[in-house]
Image (tube, rainbow, N blue to C red):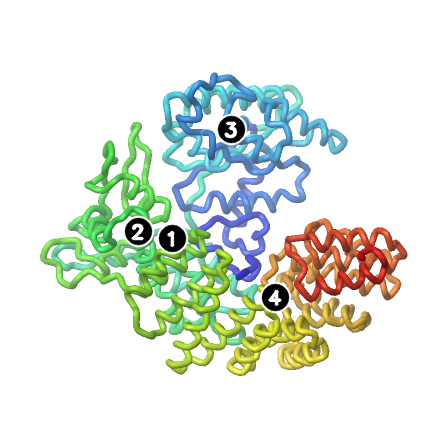
Amino acid sequence: MVTQLRADLPYVGLRPFEEDEAGSFFGRDAEARSLSAAWLRSRLVIAHGPAGAGKTSLLRAGVLPDLVGADADVLPVGRITGPGLTAASLDGLEPVVGPGNPFTRALLRCWAHDDESLSLLEALRERAERRRPRGPSRPVLLAIDQFEEFLSPRSPRLAPLRSQFVEALAGAAAELPNLRILLVLRSDHRTALLPYRRTLLAACADQAGYESAVPVTEVAVAPLSPECAVTALVEPLRAAGIRFAPGAATACVDDLTTSRTVDATGTESLLVAETVQPVFLQLVATALWRSRPVADVPVTASWLGPVGNVTAVLEDYLTRTLVTIAHEHDLDEDELRAWLTRTFVTERGRRGVVDEGLTTTAGMPTPVLDALTERYVLRCEHLSGSRRFELFDDRLLEPLQRTSTPWAGASGPAAEVGADDYLRAAQVSFADGDVATACAHVEEALRRDPAPSLTRAATQALRAQLFQAEGRLEQAEACHREAAEIYESLSDTEASGRVLAALGRLLLDAGQVGRAVEELQAAGERLPGDADVQSDLAHALWRAGQPWAAAAIFSAVLTIAPDAVAALAGRAQLRVELADDTGAIEDFDRLARTTSTKAGGVSAVGGVSAAGGLSAAAGAAELRAARALSLARLGRVTEASGESTMALRDAPDSGPVLWRVAEVIRAAGDEHGADDLLHRSLGASEPSLAPDQRAKVSRLLRRSGALT
């Protein structure tokens, strides 16, 4: 399985930041503190901003971490939308508050509440009762994100249910004076909120003992200022050891705020914005990260030219998006591009606006406009019960005009969509988890580029990953081999080595250890200085029953790259198996220091994934369990017990973890408990034991008489 840890990615792209990514969230400190303070002191807070301004990221990665030390009970962030809130599902449903209200049930699910039959007030009181020893007057912080989903027009059947949900929320606020409610929504839905706001505000009036609470506070969330955008661009790379040369980041942000547009007469003009769209900043930042220089080389303005050119990045994003949407809606991508430009770019070179129609809008099915809105190509505003669409931002005018001809008689043909475009669309769909769409784009890319080329090789390499994700290993292997052969024929040795390494990992995960060793050796010959490839080869040799050869390769890698995390983690675990417990603990401690420095204080054992495609949690748990075994054999029983407990907590169905913890228990003299965990390890699946590990567990059970 192809796995990429989120910790390895300093930028998140188009999705919002999560709470555990606060270490990569920069440029919003002041806003996070301001919103946190408002939430703590106000009975009702309404945080609003335009689409794409970063409201969800601010809440999850800015406000929630800021409240960690606060004397407050912070409920999990809620959303009240999803399955069950359709007109069909409401047929025959009596509009009652509490168990029958779908909005209430949706909110309780966000809190992982065991009993969804409770009313909102009952659920909050039950939680308060559990927290009472920590102080009955502690503020209870309740946030509902993307509240515009609750307010969006739906079936008339939902109107009474919406009113009743808000009345239930208001009733809870009236009964629990320490309840603090935060609603996060798009600015264009504030009018729709007004009748519900009056209901909530009436319930949030000051009560005895809580005179210091403010009834209501509104907080506007805007896109990033240029200064904050520079911080958000620079700091994640700085944490990864890459720095910007003076002025380079500012030049990139200036490009993000400057739009060059041409009118129908060919006259060029500049539009300069006061803010930076966070989604566009993430697109550019992600492009920079993918093409980053080595750590000791600063990012300069000249290097930014070809890589961080904003118009080129946005043009590439537009192409991938239009290809994807055209495929989803059975449209011709060139016609979709021409329609988009013709409809939303005026003859003066400015953004045009169109009102939503009944079934089509400006001649295009309205679901197409909704899809473009979801991908930040268009934005829509709710006005007087209808919607109005326009381009998401002025910064899209230039890349859109460069790839299309908006006016009759304009010079230059529209850009032709080729195999490269379909490949990029497939990569985006795969990254989004949409395997079916990615497969369709891959097949179209191969159809358009049948001859051996770099594009075809890259497409086959991606196709191999798609087959692997579907469990079709034979097809994945065939695609890897074709990609490697094409790269070899084009004298791209490095790319060939990376494909062979991916093939070796696939074979190793499939238990074909001997063949995996062959492919990884071939990859290592092409990439002799690549620490990850050499570490993978060492793991394969270890699995093939050649632990001393594996140890030699791990040590050679660490001689050249002393901070190579995969090699350190691999050698530490190998030393556990070779009963070199002192050496193993030295490696584990060195690993902790290395990863703590790289991750800004994250524990090594808690933040490193073992090789072989494991998830972050499973890999970290395996390291903990292996370390626990060495600690136990060295007589450090208390430490071993703590590591074992955390490993089992994080990966209770991991075969390798159960195996290692069993040996820890056996070292403490509990033979029966050890055999029980060994039996469990044989049936574990997240991950399961590798064939060689299964054989070792079976030998241990036979030796103890627990397996006949």
Residue at the spot 40% in from the left edge and 52% down from the top edge = 436
Q: Amino acid at mark 1?
A: Thr
| Residue 334 in which image quadrant | bottom left
Q: How far across and how far down the image is residue 28, in percent?
A: 51, 50
Quadrant holding the N terminus? bottom right
Q: How far across and how far down the image is residue 686, in percent?
A: 64, 53
> Nearer the viewer's eye, disc 3 or disc 2?
2
> Nearer the viewer's eye, disc 3 or disc 1?
1
Assess disc 1: are there few (<14), some (14-19) or many (≥20) residues with their C-alpha within 10 Å of its C-alpha: some
Determine whether the residue tagged by mark 4 lies in a helix, strand or loop.
loop
Distance, label 1 to label 4, CA atoms, is 30 Å
Nearest to N terminus: mark 3 or mark 1: 3
Nearest to N terminus: mark 1 or mark 2: 2
Q: Which residue is mark 4?
A: 511
Determine whether the residue tagged by mark 3 lies in a helix, strand or loop.
strand
Q: How far across and how far down the image is residue 150, in percent?
A: 44, 30
Determine whether the residue tagged by mark 2 lies in a helix, strand or loop.
helix
Is there any visible trace of residue 602 in the rendered image? Answer: no
Up/down of 165 relative to 2, above or below? above
Q: Which residue is mark 1?
A: 437
Q: Amino acid at mark 4?
A: Gly
Assess disc 2: are there few (<14), some (14-19) or many (≥20) residues with their C-alpha within 10 Å of its C-alpha: some
Q: Amino acid at mark 3?
A: Val
Distance, label 1 to label 2, CA atoms, is 8 Å
Q: Which residue is mark 2?
A: 327
Q: Tell me the number on the disc at residue 216.
A: 3
